[in-house]
Image (cartoon, rainbow, N blue to C red):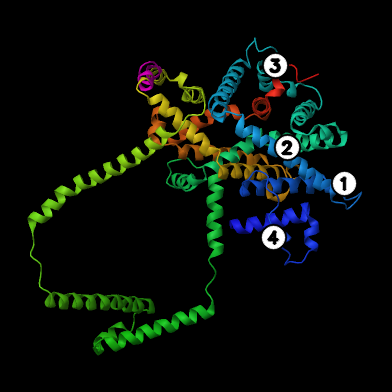
Amino acid sequence: MSDSNVTTSLRLLHIRVLSPYLLTLPKSDPRRSSPPPSITGSPAIDLELYTYFALLIRDFINPWYRLVTNDQDLCTEIVSLLTLVVQRIQKRMCDDIDWTELLLISVPKLLTLHYQDYRQAKSRLHMDHASGSASLGELFHGMQPHFALQPVPNQEAEYLRLLTASILKVLLDPKDYESDAVRHLMREILSNVVLANLIESLADPYTIHMIICKLCENYADKLDNLESTGQMAETYFSAVTNETESSSQQTSSPAPDDSVTSIQAALIDAQNQQLMDNTPPIDERTTTKKEGEGLSTRLRRLKERQNELPEEEALEDVTNEERTHKRRPFSFGYITLQLLLAPIRSLWLSLTVLFTNSQERYQKIHQHKKRTRHMRLVEPSMQFMRIAFLLEDRPILQWAWQMIAMFVWPLVRVFGGGVLVDKFLELSILHVLSEDHIAYYLRCGRDLLWPDGVFLRKADPSTPLQREYMRVRAERLLTASLPLSLVKVLFDTTDLNEIQSHIHATIEPLQNKYINKHLLYLLVDLVASKIIPELVQSDFYP
Protein backbone atom coordinates (compact mmCIF):
# COMPACT_ATOMS: atom_id res chain seq x y z
CA MET A 1 0.00 0.00 0.00
CA SER A 2 1.38 3.41 -0.96
CA ASP A 3 1.95 6.24 1.52
CA SER A 4 -0.92 8.28 0.06
CA ASN A 5 -3.38 5.41 0.53
CA VAL A 6 -2.19 4.86 4.10
CA THR A 7 -2.56 8.57 4.87
CA THR A 8 -6.06 8.62 3.37
CA SER A 9 -7.21 5.56 5.32
CA LEU A 10 -5.82 6.94 8.60
CA ARG A 11 -7.41 10.30 7.89
CA LEU A 12 -10.78 8.56 7.46
CA LEU A 13 -10.23 6.80 10.80
CA HIS A 14 -9.52 10.15 12.46
CA ILE A 15 -12.70 11.68 11.03
CA ARG A 16 -14.88 8.69 11.86
CA VAL A 17 -13.72 8.44 15.51
CA LEU A 18 -12.50 11.89 16.53
CA SER A 19 -14.66 14.18 14.39
CA PRO A 20 -17.75 12.30 13.18
CA TYR A 21 -19.63 15.56 12.62
CA LEU A 22 -17.43 16.16 9.55
CA LEU A 23 -19.12 13.22 7.83
CA THR A 24 -22.39 15.18 7.81
CA LEU A 25 -20.82 18.02 5.83
CA PRO A 26 -20.84 18.10 2.00
CA LYS A 27 -17.82 16.57 0.30
CA SER A 28 -16.99 19.96 -1.19
CA ASP A 29 -16.67 21.49 2.28
CA PRO A 30 -12.97 22.34 2.87
CA ARG A 31 -13.22 21.35 6.53
CA ARG A 32 -13.40 17.67 5.51
CA SER A 33 -10.01 17.75 3.79
CA SER A 34 -8.25 20.27 6.03
CA PRO A 35 -5.60 18.76 8.35
CA PRO A 36 -6.26 18.62 12.10
CA PRO A 37 -4.49 21.01 14.47
CA SER A 38 -0.75 20.43 14.63
CA ILE A 39 0.65 18.72 17.72
CA THR A 40 4.42 18.58 17.19
CA GLY A 41 4.92 20.55 13.97
CA SER A 42 5.71 17.39 11.99
CA PRO A 43 2.89 16.10 9.73
CA ALA A 44 4.23 12.52 9.79
CA ILE A 45 4.46 12.39 13.59
CA ASP A 46 1.09 14.12 13.99
CA LEU A 47 -0.52 11.53 11.73
CA GLU A 48 0.72 8.69 13.96
CA LEU A 49 -0.28 10.50 17.17
CA TYR A 50 -3.82 11.15 15.93
CA THR A 51 -4.00 7.48 14.97
CA TYR A 52 -3.10 6.55 18.56
CA PHE A 53 -5.77 8.93 19.88
CA ALA A 54 -8.42 7.50 17.54
CA LEU A 55 -7.61 3.88 18.43
CA LEU A 56 -7.60 4.63 22.16
CA ILE A 57 -11.00 6.31 21.99
CA ARG A 58 -12.44 3.66 19.67
CA ASP A 59 -11.43 0.72 21.88
CA PHE A 60 -11.57 2.14 25.43
CA ILE A 61 -13.93 5.12 25.49
CA ASN A 62 -16.66 4.55 22.92
CA PRO A 63 -17.67 1.00 24.05
CA TRP A 64 -19.03 2.32 27.35
CA TYR A 65 -19.52 6.03 26.57
CA ARG A 66 -21.80 5.38 23.56
CA LEU A 67 -24.13 3.45 25.85
CA VAL A 68 -24.70 6.62 27.86
CA THR A 69 -24.78 9.37 25.24
CA ASN A 70 -23.77 10.25 21.70
CA ASP A 71 -22.26 13.54 22.78
CA GLN A 72 -18.74 14.12 21.42
CA ASP A 73 -17.57 16.59 24.08
CA LEU A 74 -15.80 13.99 26.23
CA CYS A 75 -13.77 12.63 23.30
CA THR A 76 -12.82 16.15 22.26
CA GLU A 77 -11.71 16.95 25.81
CA ILE A 78 -9.62 13.74 26.01
CA VAL A 79 -7.89 14.55 22.71
CA SER A 80 -7.09 18.08 23.89
CA LEU A 81 -5.64 16.74 27.18
CA LEU A 82 -3.56 14.12 25.39
CA THR A 83 -2.34 16.79 22.98
CA LEU A 84 -1.30 18.99 25.91
CA VAL A 85 0.58 16.12 27.57
CA VAL A 86 2.39 15.23 24.32
CA GLN A 87 3.38 18.84 23.65
CA ARG A 88 4.83 19.34 27.12
CA ILE A 89 6.70 16.04 26.93
CA GLN A 90 8.05 17.07 23.53
CA LYS A 91 9.31 20.37 24.93
CA ARG A 92 11.12 18.63 27.76
CA MET A 93 12.56 15.97 25.44
CA CYS A 94 13.92 18.59 23.05
CA ASP A 95 15.22 21.09 25.61
CA ASP A 96 16.15 19.21 28.77
CA ILE A 97 17.31 15.69 27.82
CA ASP A 98 20.83 14.86 26.73
CA TRP A 99 19.92 12.00 24.38
CA THR A 100 23.55 11.26 23.60
CA GLU A 101 24.30 10.61 27.27
CA LEU A 102 21.10 8.62 27.71
CA LEU A 103 21.53 6.31 24.70
CA LEU A 104 25.31 5.94 24.67
CA ILE A 105 26.14 5.89 28.39
CA SER A 106 23.15 5.16 30.63
CA VAL A 107 21.39 2.54 28.48
CA PRO A 108 24.57 0.50 27.66
CA LYS A 109 25.48 0.46 31.37
CA LEU A 110 22.00 -0.80 32.20
CA LEU A 111 22.22 -3.51 29.53
CA THR A 112 25.67 -4.54 30.79
CA LEU A 113 24.31 -4.90 34.32
CA HIS A 114 21.36 -6.95 33.03
CA TYR A 115 23.65 -9.35 31.14
CA GLN A 116 26.07 -9.75 34.04
CA ASP A 117 23.33 -10.42 36.60
CA TYR A 118 21.55 -12.88 34.30
CA ARG A 119 24.64 -14.97 33.67
CA GLN A 120 25.65 -14.81 37.31
CA ALA A 121 22.17 -15.94 38.38
CA LYS A 122 22.23 -18.76 35.82
CA SER A 123 25.58 -19.99 37.11
CA ARG A 124 24.31 -19.96 40.73
CA LEU A 125 20.94 -21.55 40.04
CA HIS A 126 21.85 -25.13 40.99
CA MET A 127 24.39 -24.25 43.66
CA ASP A 128 23.94 -24.49 47.41
CA HIS A 129 24.22 -20.72 47.88
CA ALA A 130 21.36 -19.93 45.46
CA SER A 131 19.32 -18.56 48.40
CA GLY A 132 16.73 -21.30 48.02
CA SER A 133 15.40 -19.91 44.74
CA ALA A 134 13.31 -22.38 42.80
CA SER A 135 13.67 -20.65 39.43
CA LEU A 136 16.00 -18.42 37.50
CA GLY A 137 13.49 -15.56 37.65
CA GLU A 138 13.35 -15.61 41.46
CA LEU A 139 17.13 -15.68 41.75
CA PHE A 140 17.45 -12.78 39.29
CA HIS A 141 14.79 -10.81 41.19
CA GLY A 142 16.85 -11.26 44.34
CA MET A 143 19.79 -9.64 42.57
CA GLN A 144 17.72 -6.86 40.94
CA PRO A 145 14.62 -6.28 43.08
CA HIS A 146 12.07 -3.87 41.71
CA PHE A 147 8.97 -2.51 43.41
CA ALA A 148 6.72 -3.25 40.42
CA LEU A 149 7.65 -6.96 40.39
CA GLN A 150 7.11 -7.78 44.03
CA PRO A 151 5.07 -10.98 44.59
CA VAL A 152 1.90 -9.02 45.39
CA PRO A 153 -1.34 -9.20 43.35
CA ASN A 154 -1.76 -6.30 40.87
CA GLN A 155 1.60 -4.84 41.92
CA GLU A 156 2.60 -3.90 38.36
CA ALA A 157 -0.66 -2.07 37.67
CA GLU A 158 -0.44 -0.20 40.98
CA TYR A 159 3.15 0.87 40.32
CA LEU A 160 2.28 2.18 36.85
CA ARG A 161 -0.70 4.08 38.28
CA LEU A 162 1.50 5.79 40.87
CA LEU A 163 4.14 6.63 38.27
CA THR A 164 1.58 8.01 35.80
CA ALA A 165 -0.17 10.05 38.49
CA SER A 166 3.17 11.66 39.41
CA ILE A 167 3.87 12.45 35.75
CA LEU A 168 0.41 13.97 35.24
CA LYS A 169 0.90 16.13 38.33
CA VAL A 170 3.74 17.88 36.49
CA LEU A 171 2.32 17.93 32.96
CA LEU A 172 -1.37 18.78 33.46
CA ASP A 173 -2.74 22.16 34.40
CA PRO A 174 -3.60 22.41 38.13
CA LYS A 175 -7.35 22.75 37.46
CA ASP A 176 -7.34 19.58 35.33
CA TYR A 177 -5.24 17.61 37.78
CA GLU A 178 -7.47 18.57 40.72
CA SER A 179 -10.47 17.11 38.90
CA ASP A 180 -10.79 13.49 40.05
CA ALA A 181 -12.60 12.40 36.89
CA VAL A 182 -10.00 13.89 34.54
CA ARG A 183 -7.04 12.68 36.60
CA HIS A 184 -8.30 9.10 36.96
CA LEU A 185 -9.36 8.82 33.32
CA MET A 186 -6.01 10.08 32.00
CA ARG A 187 -4.15 7.91 34.49
CA GLU A 188 -5.94 4.75 33.39
CA ILE A 189 -5.45 5.51 29.69
CA LEU A 190 -1.71 6.11 30.02
CA SER A 191 -0.89 3.46 32.62
CA ASN A 192 -3.27 0.58 31.93
CA VAL A 193 -3.59 0.90 28.16
CA VAL A 194 -0.30 2.34 26.90
CA LEU A 195 2.49 1.58 29.38
CA ALA A 196 1.24 -1.77 30.69
CA ASN A 197 0.65 -3.22 27.23
CA LEU A 198 3.92 -1.87 25.84
CA ILE A 199 5.89 -3.45 28.68
CA GLU A 200 3.94 -6.70 28.38
CA SER A 201 4.58 -6.86 24.65
CA LEU A 202 8.22 -5.75 24.60
CA ALA A 203 9.15 -8.14 27.43
CA ASP A 204 7.91 -11.09 25.38
CA PRO A 205 10.83 -12.85 23.60
CA TYR A 206 8.51 -13.45 20.63
CA THR A 207 8.23 -9.67 20.13
CA ILE A 208 12.00 -9.23 20.47
CA HIS A 209 12.55 -11.87 17.79
CA MET A 210 9.99 -10.19 15.53
CA ILE A 211 11.83 -6.87 15.90
CA ILE A 212 15.14 -8.55 15.03
CA CYS A 213 13.57 -10.13 11.95
CA LYS A 214 12.11 -6.77 10.95
CA LEU A 215 15.47 -5.00 11.30
CA CYS A 216 17.33 -7.76 9.38
CA GLU A 217 14.74 -8.36 6.67
CA ASN A 218 17.24 -7.22 4.00
CA TYR A 219 19.28 -10.36 4.70
CA ALA A 220 16.38 -12.78 4.16
CA ASP A 221 17.46 -13.62 0.59
CA LYS A 222 21.03 -14.21 1.73
CA LEU A 223 19.79 -16.55 4.47
CA ASP A 224 17.61 -18.51 2.05
CA ASN A 225 20.61 -18.87 -0.26
CA LEU A 226 22.81 -20.14 2.59
CA GLU A 227 20.19 -22.70 3.57
CA SER A 228 19.57 -23.87 0.00
CA THR A 229 23.31 -24.30 -0.71
CA GLY A 230 23.84 -26.34 2.48
CA GLN A 231 26.10 -23.80 4.23
CA MET A 232 23.61 -23.71 7.10
CA ALA A 233 21.96 -26.86 8.38
CA GLU A 234 18.29 -27.07 7.45
CA THR A 235 15.73 -27.12 10.22
CA TYR A 236 12.17 -28.30 10.40
CA PHE A 237 11.01 -24.78 9.59
CA SER A 238 13.18 -24.42 6.48
CA ALA A 239 11.98 -27.81 5.23
CA VAL A 240 8.36 -26.78 5.73
CA THR A 241 9.03 -23.46 4.00
CA ASN A 242 10.66 -25.13 0.99
CA GLU A 243 7.82 -27.65 0.74
CA THR A 244 5.25 -24.85 0.90
CA GLU A 245 7.08 -22.85 -1.79
CA SER A 246 7.31 -25.85 -4.13
CA SER A 247 3.64 -26.68 -3.69
CA SER A 248 2.69 -23.04 -4.30
CA GLN A 249 4.76 -23.01 -7.45
CA GLN A 250 3.04 -26.17 -8.65
CA THR A 251 -0.39 -24.78 -7.93
CA SER A 252 0.49 -21.43 -9.52
CA SER A 253 1.30 -23.05 -12.90
CA PRO A 254 -2.11 -23.75 -14.57
CA ALA A 255 -2.86 -26.67 -16.84
CA PRO A 256 -2.62 -25.99 -20.59
CA ASP A 257 -5.85 -24.80 -22.12
CA ASP A 258 -7.31 -26.19 -25.35
CA SER A 259 -7.30 -22.76 -26.95
CA VAL A 260 -3.61 -22.31 -26.10
CA THR A 261 -2.83 -25.74 -27.57
CA SER A 262 -4.63 -24.91 -30.79
CA ILE A 263 -2.75 -21.60 -31.07
CA GLN A 264 0.57 -23.40 -30.54
CA ALA A 265 -0.32 -25.94 -33.25
CA ALA A 266 -1.17 -23.14 -35.67
CA LEU A 267 2.15 -21.40 -34.94
CA ILE A 268 4.07 -24.64 -35.56
CA ASP A 269 2.27 -25.12 -38.89
CA ALA A 270 3.13 -21.55 -39.89
CA GLN A 271 6.79 -22.10 -38.98
CA ASN A 272 6.87 -25.34 -40.94
CA GLN A 273 5.33 -23.63 -43.96
CA GLN A 274 7.90 -20.81 -43.79
CA LEU A 275 10.77 -23.24 -43.53
CA MET A 276 9.43 -25.28 -46.46
CA ASP A 277 9.34 -22.14 -48.56
CA ASN A 278 12.96 -21.29 -47.71
CA THR A 279 14.47 -24.79 -47.99
CA PRO A 280 15.49 -26.46 -51.27
CA PRO A 281 13.59 -29.51 -52.56
CA ILE A 282 14.38 -32.73 -50.75
CA ASP A 283 15.36 -35.95 -52.42
CA GLU A 284 12.69 -38.68 -52.52
CA ARG A 285 15.07 -41.20 -50.94
CA THR A 286 15.59 -38.89 -47.95
CA THR A 287 11.87 -38.43 -47.66
CA THR A 288 11.26 -42.15 -47.73
CA LYS A 289 13.93 -42.62 -45.10
CA LYS A 290 12.34 -40.04 -42.76
CA GLU A 291 8.79 -41.29 -43.05
CA GLY A 292 9.32 -43.62 -40.11
CA GLU A 293 10.54 -40.83 -37.80
CA GLY A 294 8.29 -39.47 -35.11
CA LEU A 295 6.74 -36.02 -34.93
CA SER A 296 9.08 -34.86 -32.18
CA THR A 297 12.16 -35.65 -34.27
CA ARG A 298 10.78 -33.70 -37.19
CA LEU A 299 9.96 -30.70 -35.04
CA ARG A 300 13.46 -30.76 -33.51
CA ARG A 301 15.09 -30.78 -36.96
CA LEU A 302 12.86 -27.97 -38.13
CA LYS A 303 13.82 -25.96 -35.04
CA GLU A 304 17.54 -26.52 -35.71
CA ARG A 305 17.08 -25.42 -39.31
CA GLN A 306 15.25 -22.29 -38.12
CA ASN A 307 18.14 -21.43 -35.76
CA GLU A 308 20.68 -21.86 -38.57
CA LEU A 309 18.94 -19.40 -40.88
CA PRO A 310 19.48 -16.23 -38.72
CA GLU A 311 23.14 -17.23 -38.23
CA GLU A 312 23.66 -17.51 -41.98
CA GLU A 313 21.98 -14.15 -42.55
CA ALA A 314 24.12 -12.51 -39.84
CA LEU A 315 27.24 -14.03 -41.39
CA GLU A 316 26.31 -12.59 -44.78
CA ASP A 317 25.80 -9.15 -43.21
CA VAL A 318 29.21 -9.28 -41.54
CA THR A 319 30.87 -10.35 -44.81
CA ASN A 320 29.23 -7.52 -46.70
CA GLU A 321 30.27 -5.05 -44.01
CA GLU A 322 33.85 -6.21 -44.16
CA ARG A 323 33.85 -5.78 -47.90
CA THR A 324 32.55 -2.22 -47.72
CA HIS A 325 34.77 -1.06 -44.83
CA LYS A 326 38.51 -1.23 -44.81
CA ARG A 327 40.08 -3.02 -41.83
CA ARG A 328 41.89 -0.96 -39.22
CA PRO A 329 45.58 -1.70 -38.71
CA PHE A 330 46.37 -3.91 -35.68
CA SER A 331 48.46 -2.03 -33.03
CA PHE A 332 50.13 -4.34 -30.52
CA GLY A 333 51.78 -1.44 -28.68
CA TYR A 334 48.50 0.40 -28.18
CA ILE A 335 46.81 -2.66 -26.67
CA THR A 336 49.81 -3.33 -24.40
CA LEU A 337 49.76 0.27 -23.16
CA GLN A 338 46.03 0.04 -22.40
CA LEU A 339 46.53 -3.17 -20.43
CA LEU A 340 49.32 -1.61 -18.37
CA LEU A 341 47.50 1.64 -17.65
CA ALA A 342 44.07 0.13 -16.86
CA PRO A 343 44.93 -1.06 -13.28
CA ILE A 344 46.70 2.23 -12.50
CA ARG A 345 43.73 4.24 -13.77
CA SER A 346 41.27 2.10 -11.79
CA LEU A 347 43.36 2.47 -8.61
CA TRP A 348 43.57 6.22 -9.08
CA LEU A 349 39.80 6.56 -9.53
CA SER A 350 39.16 4.44 -6.42
CA LEU A 351 41.53 6.51 -4.30
CA THR A 352 39.98 9.73 -5.60
CA VAL A 353 36.46 8.59 -4.69
CA LEU A 354 37.56 7.32 -1.26
CA PHE A 355 39.52 10.50 -0.49
CA THR A 356 36.66 12.74 -1.60
CA ASN A 357 34.02 10.87 0.42
CA SER A 358 36.21 10.67 3.51
CA GLN A 359 37.01 14.37 3.25
CA GLU A 360 33.33 15.28 2.98
CA ARG A 361 32.49 13.08 5.94
CA TYR A 362 35.43 14.44 7.93
CA GLN A 363 34.44 18.03 7.26
CA LYS A 364 30.86 17.33 8.31
CA ILE A 365 31.96 15.69 11.56
CA HIS A 366 34.67 18.28 12.24
CA GLN A 367 32.29 21.22 11.79
CA HIS A 368 29.66 19.68 14.07
CA LYS A 369 29.45 21.46 17.39
CA LYS A 370 29.35 18.94 20.20
CA ARG A 371 26.31 19.34 22.45
CA THR A 372 26.95 16.87 25.24
CA ARG A 373 29.53 17.54 27.90
CA HIS A 374 30.36 13.84 28.26
CA MET A 375 33.47 12.29 26.74
CA ARG A 376 34.55 8.78 25.76
CA LEU A 377 31.07 8.00 24.49
CA VAL A 378 32.15 4.80 22.78
CA GLU A 379 33.49 3.07 25.90
CA PRO A 380 30.17 2.02 27.57
CA SER A 381 28.93 0.49 24.30
CA MET A 382 32.22 -1.36 23.78
CA GLN A 383 32.06 -2.66 27.36
CA PHE A 384 28.56 -3.99 26.70
CA MET A 385 29.76 -5.66 23.48
CA ARG A 386 32.58 -7.32 25.42
CA ILE A 387 30.14 -8.73 27.97
CA ALA A 388 27.46 -9.68 25.44
CA PHE A 389 29.78 -11.61 23.10
CA LEU A 390 31.52 -13.39 26.02
CA LEU A 391 34.99 -12.15 25.08
CA GLU A 392 36.20 -13.03 28.59
CA ASP A 393 35.91 -16.71 27.65
CA ARG A 394 38.45 -16.27 24.82
CA PRO A 395 41.89 -15.49 26.36
CA ILE A 396 43.62 -14.39 23.16
CA LEU A 397 40.82 -12.01 22.18
CA GLN A 398 40.60 -10.74 25.75
CA TRP A 399 44.35 -10.01 25.72
CA ALA A 400 44.08 -8.18 22.37
CA TRP A 401 41.14 -6.18 23.71
CA GLN A 402 43.12 -5.09 26.75
CA MET A 403 46.16 -4.16 24.67
CA ILE A 404 44.03 -1.95 22.43
CA ALA A 405 42.39 -0.33 25.45
CA MET A 406 45.72 0.31 27.19
CA PHE A 407 47.96 1.42 24.29
CA VAL A 408 46.14 2.01 21.00
CA TRP A 409 43.02 3.86 22.16
CA PRO A 410 44.91 6.39 24.37
CA LEU A 411 47.11 7.28 21.38
CA VAL A 412 44.03 7.76 19.20
CA ARG A 413 42.53 10.08 21.81
CA VAL A 414 45.76 12.09 22.17
CA PHE A 415 45.84 12.89 18.45
CA GLY A 416 42.20 14.02 18.37
CA GLY A 417 40.57 10.76 17.33
CA GLY A 418 38.46 10.56 20.48
CA VAL A 419 36.75 13.89 19.78
CA LEU A 420 36.00 12.84 16.20
CA VAL A 421 34.53 9.54 17.41
CA ASP A 422 32.36 11.37 19.97
CA LYS A 423 31.10 13.78 17.30
CA PHE A 424 30.41 10.91 14.92
CA LEU A 425 28.39 9.05 17.57
CA GLU A 426 26.45 12.20 18.46
CA LEU A 427 25.58 12.75 14.79
CA SER A 428 24.44 9.12 14.60
CA ILE A 429 22.13 9.64 17.58
CA LEU A 430 20.67 12.77 15.98
CA HIS A 431 20.06 10.77 12.80
CA VAL A 432 18.34 7.98 14.75
CA LEU A 433 16.10 10.58 16.44
CA SER A 434 15.18 12.38 13.23
CA GLU A 435 11.59 13.05 12.21
CA ASP A 436 11.29 10.08 9.85
CA HIS A 437 12.73 7.66 12.38
CA ILE A 438 10.43 8.84 15.19
CA ALA A 439 7.41 8.39 12.91
CA TYR A 440 8.69 4.90 12.11
CA TYR A 441 9.06 4.07 15.83
CA LEU A 442 5.50 5.26 16.50
CA ARG A 443 4.27 3.13 13.60
CA CYS A 444 6.05 0.08 15.00
CA GLY A 445 4.55 0.72 18.43
CA ARG A 446 1.09 0.95 16.87
CA ASP A 447 1.65 -2.35 15.09
CA LEU A 448 2.68 -3.92 18.40
CA LEU A 449 -0.37 -2.68 20.32
CA TRP A 450 -2.88 -2.96 17.47
CA PRO A 451 -1.66 -5.71 15.11
CA ASP A 452 -3.86 -5.61 11.97
CA GLY A 453 -5.97 -2.89 13.62
CA VAL A 454 -7.08 -5.18 16.50
CA PHE A 455 -5.99 -4.49 20.06
CA LEU A 456 -3.31 -6.80 21.41
CA ARG A 457 -5.43 -8.43 24.12
CA LYS A 458 -8.09 -9.40 21.60
CA ALA A 459 -5.64 -11.09 19.21
CA ASP A 460 -4.87 -14.82 19.29
CA PRO A 461 -1.70 -15.68 21.25
CA SER A 462 1.22 -17.18 19.38
CA THR A 463 1.67 -20.95 19.46
CA PRO A 464 4.87 -22.64 20.76
CA LEU A 465 5.72 -23.66 17.18
CA GLN A 466 5.43 -20.05 15.99
CA ARG A 467 7.60 -18.84 18.85
CA GLU A 468 10.29 -21.41 18.11
CA TYR A 469 10.22 -20.57 14.41
CA MET A 470 10.63 -16.85 15.16
CA ARG A 471 13.54 -17.54 17.51
CA VAL A 472 15.43 -19.65 14.98
CA ARG A 473 14.68 -17.16 12.22
CA ALA A 474 15.97 -14.22 14.27
CA GLU A 475 19.20 -16.04 15.21
CA ARG A 476 19.86 -17.04 11.59
CA LEU A 477 19.17 -13.56 10.27
CA LEU A 478 21.63 -12.13 12.79
CA THR A 479 24.15 -14.75 11.68
CA ALA A 480 23.68 -13.80 8.04
CA SER A 481 23.94 -10.07 8.77
CA LEU A 482 27.37 -10.20 10.46
CA PRO A 483 30.42 -9.73 8.19
CA LEU A 484 32.64 -12.81 8.00
CA SER A 485 35.74 -10.79 8.95
CA LEU A 486 34.09 -9.63 12.19
CA VAL A 487 32.74 -13.11 12.90
CA LYS A 488 36.20 -14.60 12.45
CA VAL A 489 37.61 -12.19 15.02
CA LEU A 490 34.79 -12.56 17.56
CA PHE A 491 34.12 -16.28 17.42
CA ASP A 492 37.30 -17.70 15.82
CA THR A 493 35.29 -19.75 13.31
CA THR A 494 33.62 -19.43 9.92
CA ASP A 495 31.18 -22.31 10.37
CA LEU A 496 27.74 -20.71 10.20
CA ASN A 497 26.14 -23.32 12.46
CA GLU A 498 28.70 -22.63 15.20
CA ILE A 499 28.19 -18.91 14.71
CA GLN A 500 24.45 -19.38 15.21
CA SER A 501 25.11 -21.14 18.53
CA HIS A 502 27.26 -18.16 19.59
CA ILE A 503 24.45 -15.77 18.57
CA HIS A 504 22.04 -17.86 20.66
CA ALA A 505 24.31 -17.44 23.68
CA THR A 506 24.55 -13.70 22.97
CA ILE A 507 20.78 -13.05 23.04
CA GLU A 508 20.01 -15.66 25.72
CA PRO A 509 19.65 -13.03 28.51
CA LEU A 510 16.63 -11.67 26.57
CA GLN A 511 14.76 -15.00 26.43
CA ASN A 512 12.93 -14.80 29.77
CA LYS A 513 9.84 -12.59 29.91
CA TYR A 514 9.88 -12.07 33.69
CA ILE A 515 13.57 -11.12 33.65
CA ASN A 516 13.03 -8.83 30.67
CA LYS A 517 10.43 -6.95 32.70
CA HIS A 518 13.14 -5.99 35.20
CA LEU A 519 15.11 -4.40 32.37
CA LEU A 520 12.07 -2.60 30.95
CA TYR A 521 10.94 -1.18 34.29
CA LEU A 522 14.45 0.10 34.93
CA LEU A 523 14.41 1.72 31.47
CA VAL A 524 11.00 3.30 32.20
CA ASP A 525 12.33 4.68 35.50
CA LEU A 526 15.45 6.00 33.78
CA VAL A 527 13.60 7.76 30.94
CA ALA A 528 10.93 9.16 33.30
CA SER A 529 13.59 10.60 35.60
CA LYS A 530 15.33 12.23 32.64
CA ILE A 531 12.16 13.73 31.16
CA ILE A 532 10.71 14.81 34.51
CA PRO A 533 13.58 15.34 36.97
CA GLU A 534 11.03 16.51 39.59
CA LEU A 535 10.24 12.83 40.20
CA VAL A 536 13.59 12.26 41.94
CA GLN A 537 13.44 15.39 44.08
CA SER A 538 12.76 14.82 47.75
CA ASP A 539 10.34 17.75 48.11
CA PHE A 540 8.14 16.62 45.18
CA TYR A 541 6.11 14.14 47.24
CA PRO A 542 4.10 15.40 50.23
Report whether residue 491 is seen: no
Q: Amino acid at mark 2?
A: Val
**As rendered, which of 286 and 312 lies closer to the eye?**
312
The percent position of residue 103, horizontal first and vertical second, equals 56, 29
Q: Amino acid at mark 1?
A: Trp
Give the mark nearer the N terminus: 2 vs 3: 2
| Spatial separation of the CA atoms under disc 4 and disc 2 | 26 Å
Image: magenta residue range? 402-413
> Label 3 crowding class (10 Å Cα cut-off): few <14, some 14-19, many 20+?
some
Task: Point out which mark residue 85 bears.
Answer: 2
Residue position marked by numbered label 1 in the rendering: 64
Residue occupying the point 73% across, 39% down: 84
Would you say the residues marked 1 and 2 are in contact, meaning their CB atoms lie under 8 Å apart? no
Give the mark nearer the N terminus: 1 vs 3: 1
Is residue 469 covered in magenta? no
| Spatial separation of the CA atoms under disc 4 and disc 3 | 61 Å
Give the mark nearer the N terminus: 4 vs 3: 4
Q: Amino acid at mark 3?
A: Ser
Looking at the image, residue 30 lies above or below residue 324: above
Q: Amino acid at mark 4?
A: Ser
Residue occupying the point 58% across, 58% down: 2
Task: Point out which mark residue 133 bears.
Answer: 3
The percent position of residue 67, horizontal first and vertical second, equals 90, 50
